[in-house]
Image: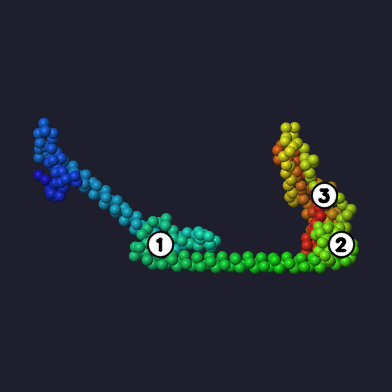
Amino acid sequence: MLSARERDVLAVFVWDEKGNSYTTTLSAPDDQPEPTWDALVSALRLEVAERDKAASAKAEDEARKVAENEATIAAVLAAPAKELTKNTYGSGSGIECAYWHDMLRIDWSDARLAAKRAEVDAYVQAVCAEARERHERIEQEEKAAKALSSAEKQERETRFSAAAKAFLAEYGTDNQRARHKEGLLPQRELVDLIRERVFARLDAFDRYAKINADDIDHSDDCDHELSPKYMVDAATELDADDYARLSRIRKAAPDGAEVEARKHVGVCTCCTSDRVYKRSALVSVEWHGRKLSREYAI
């Protein structure tokens, strides 16, 4: 006897999706007898079991999705607004702003999330407003710094020009003063002339001679045509003699001068077989808005 469930399935599914009846589907070839009622019932019960299994799996999957969605909604409701947003840079604006973080993949249209959505919207607007204000403030500060820098530069050049004119009146030649008056005196010649007076107290010390290509040794198989590499950095160590010379230079340097011990290195970029080292004392002083320097051997 068929169960109520089997009778319901038989009544509804007596025709399959292709329009074939169960009796037709189960019909045997012409040379075989027609299937018995028992065979039809067995096939029906297998069909019922398969359909019930699929329906159960579908129900379980839907229940899992509902549970996951409920858990996600609960997590969103409990999370601070900041955790539901992500910072990025607006396209071409250079302003850091926030946008919706879609990693949660939830349905924001759920009525239970309306208040949280409003909270996050308010947070995003506040973040963007703060970012725009910060961006505008930085722009204003940069403009002010550039304007100040330009004004300071102009003020230094004005001071230097006035001092240079007075310097030429006392130490320059008639030819130099005439060329300066017409704007024809080269800046290098003027600065060199000033340096001669500013660093006169250091004339007893040898000027530093830069490392050149002839100072660098090479291995036998080196291509000497390759350019050597030169490096300059603050000295990290000095022997007793070097330090004694540095001390004498510091003592003789112009008032207010800065004296820095430096290390110079020369090496071939091909063989790097040997390195040449030299040390110097860089003496710098500000003269009426212009920084002047000379380097001496130590």
Residue shown at the point (18%, 42%) measured from the top left: 46
Q: Secondary structure at mark 2?
A: helix
State which tag comes first along the sequence, 3 or 1: 1
Q: CA distance from mark 1 to mark 2?
A: 81 Å
In this view, the mark in front (1 or 2): 2
Disc count in the image? 3
Nearest-to-viewer mark from 3 and 1: 3
List the residue tagged with mark 1: 78
Answer whether residue 294 is visible to the viewer in this image. yes
Q: Which residue is pictured at 86% across the width and 50% down the height?
A: 206
Separation of disc 3 and disc 1 at Cα? 71 Å
What percent of the width, then of the height, locates residue 292? Answer: 80, 59
Q: Amino acid at mark 2?
A: Gln
Q: Is residue 97 above or below residue 13?
A: below
Q: Residue at x 76, y 65 (%)?
A: 157
Residue 297 image offset from top left, x and y in percent: 83, 49
Kind of residue at disc 3: Tyr
Q: Residues within 10 Å of mark 3 (few under 14, many from 20)?
A: some
Query: Disc 1 residue type?
Result: Ala
How are the residues colored?
Answer: rainbow
Q: Give the CA separation, mark 2 to mark 3.
A: 28 Å
Tell me if 12 is positioned left or right of 265 in this view: left
Q: Which residue is mark 3?
A: 208
Q: Which residue is mark 2?
A: 176
Mark 2 against mark 3, which lies toward the viewer? 2
